[in-house]
Image (spheres, rainbow, N blue to C red):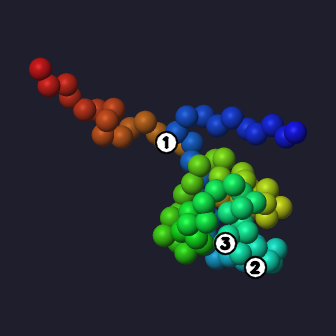
Amino acid sequence: MSRRKTWPKGTWMKLRSKEILIAYMDDKRFSTGRLAQYAGFSRSFIGHLRSGYKTSCSPDLAEAISEALAVPRIALFDERTATGSGSNSQRKKVA
């Protein structure tokens, strides 16, 4: 049994490019449905990544896609972490 990495809160993965994902899928002869089944995620979300409609995902999905295609995660995704400087962190309290 493989142990998955625990990711710091606020970590997400940015797809390097839809063309790279498509190339790996074509090379391994994976359809959108087949990759979704192997990765354990929805076919529609995989389709959104493939089309470029979505460009980021959770670390768990990035790991699952990389494992299914048998490529290093870094070949498909860049790791990103939220900085915590969003509007919620500087919101004033109203009395």
Q: Residues within 10 Å of mark 2 (few under 14, many from 20)?
A: few
Which residue, as the protein is rendered here, is positioned at the far top? 95
Contact, CB < 8 Å: mark 3 with mark 2? Answer: no
Query: Which of the image's four quarters has the C terminus?
Result: top left
All told, the count of numbered labels is: 3
- Decide: is 90 above or below 80: above
Locate residue 64 relative to residue 70 in the image: left or right. left
Which amino acid type is marked by label 2? Asp
Q: Residues within 10 Å of mark 3 (few under 14, many from 20)?
A: some
Locate residue 36 relative to residue 55 in the image: left or right. right
Q: Which mark is residue 26?
A: 2
- Decide: is 48 above or below 27: above
Q: Which residue was labeled with disc 3?
A: 32
Locate residue 89 relative to residue 34 in the image: left or right. left
- Decide: is 17 above or below 74: below
Residue 71 found in image quarter = bottom right
Residue occupying the point 76% across, 39% down: 4
Q: Position of residue 73 (x, y in %)?
A: 74, 55
Contact, CB < 8 Å: mark 3 with mark 1? Answer: no
For label 3, the SS is helix
Which amino acid type is marked by label 3? Thr
For label 1, the SS is loop
Locate residue 32 relative to residue 30 in the image: left or right. left
- The nearer-to-camera label among 3 and 2 is 3
